[in-house]
Amino acid sequence: MKRIFQIALGIIAAIGGYLDIGDLVFNAQAGALFGYKLLWTIPIGVLGIMVFAEQSGRVAAIAKKANFDLIREEYPKRLATLTLAASLGVTVLTLAAELGGMGFALNYFFDVSESFFILVGLLFLILVSWYFSFDMIERLFGYGGLALLVFVVGDFHMHPHWPSIGQGFVPHGSSQLLYWYFAVGLVAAAMMPYEIYFYSSGALEEGWGEKDLGVNRANAIIGYLLGGTLAIGLMVAAAMVLLPQNIQPDNLGQVVLAAIEPFGGWGLVLALLGMFFAIGGATIDTAFSAAYNLSQHQGWKWGKKATKAQAKKWWMVLFAAFGIGFAIVATGVDPVELTEYSVIFSVVAMPLTFFPIVRAASSRELMGKYASGWVSKSLGWLYFGIICILAIAAPVLLVMTNGGGG
Amino acid sequence: MNISWLLRLLVLLLALALSGCGSNMKTDELSRGIETLQSISASGQVLAEQVSEGKTKNTYVRVLARQLGDELQHETEKLNDASGLDKPRHQAIELAGQVNKQLGDLQSRPYDRKQAQEIATQLKKLSNQASRLSEALK
């Protein structure tokens, strides 16, 4: 049981990263538009984020440095500040979208108003952040998000055509720009920088050291495998339920239709609960990341391990991030559209975020005998190359496809 | 950059934004609008079928039907604001009105399984009509 709880960090980072409001709709849209054809993008993204998470967790455990400690130390001052500004901008935009998503998910249960439940969600998160320990937070949202497994179980229940699913995992091309927009978006969505900000800082919150390297590896592998499995389950469910009807989901409610089909009312309740916790996890990931990044960049005391008086500035930034996110979503902007744009803009910030991790993890000077071996090093630089290509391709495809509208 | 340059830039941006209003609709834009209408109608149909089979919950049905109605309203406004391609555009507006009525009925009586069955049949017809209209434009 203790071992199961030890992988909570990987699960909350993976579910919050993989199945936030944008990903929930984006994955379902991919399945509803292209059936199983884009399934191959998910393992590519999963392996990439596993590599970066494992490396950042290892650096945190051995060198006691989180992502923005590395950025502050490795980059010239201006570049570090630019990286900070980009990361804060994208992270707070995503946070706003997630808050909106929580409000929408809750409103399906009670039908009062989305705005009311956005406020309820915000207050809930503030209370949880203030009173719950870091362990409790990651367990609540990580394991709550597993209710989304209802989509995976539902896939088995609906007897899909397995050979077609198998073929979907074989990468193949297409002449449609929209196909490539989704392919790039799906790989990028798996490697959102805030997952790594949260993961590396979380490793320090949990006080990982040399003895926890196995736990780090288990978190990176099991957590992200679970996140990837849920994403696959969602895409397959959408391909089976929404595609035959030509439904293009634009909101969470349309995605839920795919869980109701096999299980009725229970499917509905589990899907909405899973969405609430997964999106709540993403909100926590983003809000904490904003506070971690600024504090680490400025060299302030940070995190829930420090006393509230010691980490006063960290708490102020955390609440400011919640407040700004709330103000943005209160303007009435569509959370799904907001997060889809933030995924694409995050891609541009990715190389700046991941470069110092791959470099630090490979450094014998910093990591000693725990420096990356040739497999980890090769994968790290290979994926760094991939995100550099994505950083160029994503904005171009965004413009050429009218923001994914075709 | 001084104030007058900023003002000129703002005026230019405003002019560019306004130039999009009431502009001639292109075939692919109309086709996208009709595909959205078809998707909304099909979503309503699946939702109504689930209501008729007793598979779902009232609050969820109400909220989703309202959201679909709002999206439809937004799409109809875009179709109304545009000009050109009059015949298919007016057909699409007419279809949107009929889909909206069905969604409104579903929203106001989400517990009525018999009515939901009729709504599902109607929305299926409307969804097929939208598909045919979209195909005809290609």
Image (tube, grey):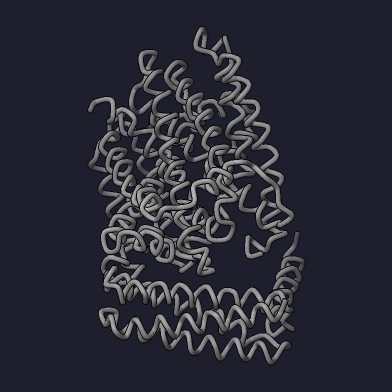
Q: Nearer the viewer, residue A125 or A130?
A: A125
Image-quadrant location for residue A218: top left
Image-quadrant location for residue A134: top left
| Residue B104 in picture, x, y percent from top left | 38, 85
Q: Nearer the viewer, residue B33 or B41?
A: B41
Q: Is residue A85 visible?
A: no
Q: Is residue B41 visible?
A: yes
Above/below status of A286 relative to B80 = above
Q: Is A66 on the left or on the right of A77, as rendered? A: left
Who's the residue at 48% across and 74% down the image?
B42
Above/below status of A182 relative to B80 = above
Q: Nearer the viewer, residue A366 or A260?
A: A260
Who's the residue at 51% across and 36% down the image?
A46
Above/below status of B130 relative to A220 = below
| Residue A206 in picture, x, y percent from top left | 33, 26
Who's the residue at 27% across and 53% down the image?
A124
User: How many marks overall?
Assistant: 0
Above/below status of A122 relative to A41 = below
Who's the residue at 55% across and 19% down the image?
A361
| Residue A359 in picture, x, y percent from top left | 61, 21
Residue at the outermost top position: A369
Q: Is A321 on the left or on the right of A391, as rendered? A: left
Q: Is A79 on the left or on the right of A276, as rendered? A: right
| Residue A258 in picture, x, y percent from top left | 41, 61
Q: Nearer the viewer, residue A320 or B133?
A: B133
